[in-house]
């Protein structure tokens, strides 16, 4: 019975776990991108990876045992719960499977604040040897606009990738650690084969 891993989608610095990290000047609790209690009861262990003011591509990097994924596009971050659909509120949810065609569910990972998604809502992607797929791009700026300058509470404080997990466990390094795209483990799931 193996583990399935998801690795850092970008290179950068851990700026938030269950709380924001002191290296970004805050230790407040880190909210999840969810609209209701049912969602909050399903998604856990947020991880923010700051990209040093850059807006690179966001990639899903995964271990070889993941043979297919199914993706969903929702609006669950920032003010998405009030119906506003924009890059800051957009999430991409990725279900992980041990067999092609979305068979043998392992768990799921959520990416928040995704610009220009490169995957489709409800789409299944099969993999034969590949261990990555582009999800979208990191968003620039702050949200709401000028929130830092005006002393308001910010939902999005500069370019970073927000992640959460469903099932499994977080194995990301601690606050303020450096992570490397495609190699630093962030989450893992223990699953049975055959399913």
Image (spheres, helix red, strand yellow):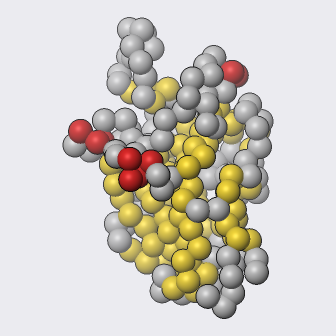
Residues 192 and 152: in front is: 192
Q: Residue furthest bottom?
A: 194
In the displayed structure, 48 sits above or below 97; it is above
Residue visible at 67% across and 76% down in the picture: 191
Q: Quadrant of the C terminus?
A: bottom right
Residue 57 appears anywhere in the view:
no
Q: Residue furthest left?
A: 83
54 sits to left or right of 174? left
Against 122, is 75 above or below?
Answer: above
- Percent from the top left, x then y, of residue 161? 55, 43
Residue 5, quarter of the rendered image? bottom right
Considering only vertical position in the picture, is 176 above or below 70? above
Residue 85 showing in the rendered view? yes
Q: Please tell me which residue is depicted at 59% across the width and 73% down the height of the picture.
A: 106
Horizontal arrangement in the rendering, residue 152 relative to residue 129 (left or right): left
Measured as percent of width and height from the top left, residue 28 is found at 57, 23
Residue at horizontal 38 percent and vertical 53 percent from the top: 38
Frontmost residue, 35 versus 87: 35
- Front residue of 37/88: it is 37
The answer to which quarter of the image holds residue 19 is top right
Left or right of 33? Residue 129 is right
Image quadrant containing the N terminus: bottom right
How many labels, in total?
Answer: 0
5 vs 80, left or right, is right
Q: Residue at x 35, y 22 (%)?
A: 145
Image: 10 above or below 15 = below
- Where is residue 7 drawn, in percent x and y? 69, 57
């Amino acid at each position: 019975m193996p583990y399935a891993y998801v690795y850092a989608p970008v290179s950068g610095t851990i700026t938030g776990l269950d709380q924001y990290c002191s290296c970004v000047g805050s230790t407040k609790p880190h909210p999840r991108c969810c609209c209701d209690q049912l969602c909050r009861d399903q998604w856990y262990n947020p991880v923010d990876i700051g990209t040093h003011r850059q807006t690179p591509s966001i990639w899903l990097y995964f271990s070889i045992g993941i043979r297919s994924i199914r993706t969903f596009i929702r609006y669950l971050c920032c003010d998405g719960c009030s119906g506003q659909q924009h890059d800051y509120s957009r999430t991409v949810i990725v279900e992980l499977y041990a067999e092609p065609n979305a068979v043998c569910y392992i768990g799921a990972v959520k990416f928040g604040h995704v610009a220009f998604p490169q995957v489709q809502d409800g789409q299944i992607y099969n993999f034969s040897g590949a261990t990555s797929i582009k999800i979208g791009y990191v968003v620039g700026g702050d949200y709401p606009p000028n929130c830092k300058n005006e002393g308001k509470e910010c939902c999005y404080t500069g370019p970073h990738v927000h992640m959460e997990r469903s099932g499994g466990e977080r194995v990301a390094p601690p606050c303020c650690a450096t992570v490397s795209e495609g190699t630093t483990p962030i989450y893992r799931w223990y699953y049975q084969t055959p399913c």
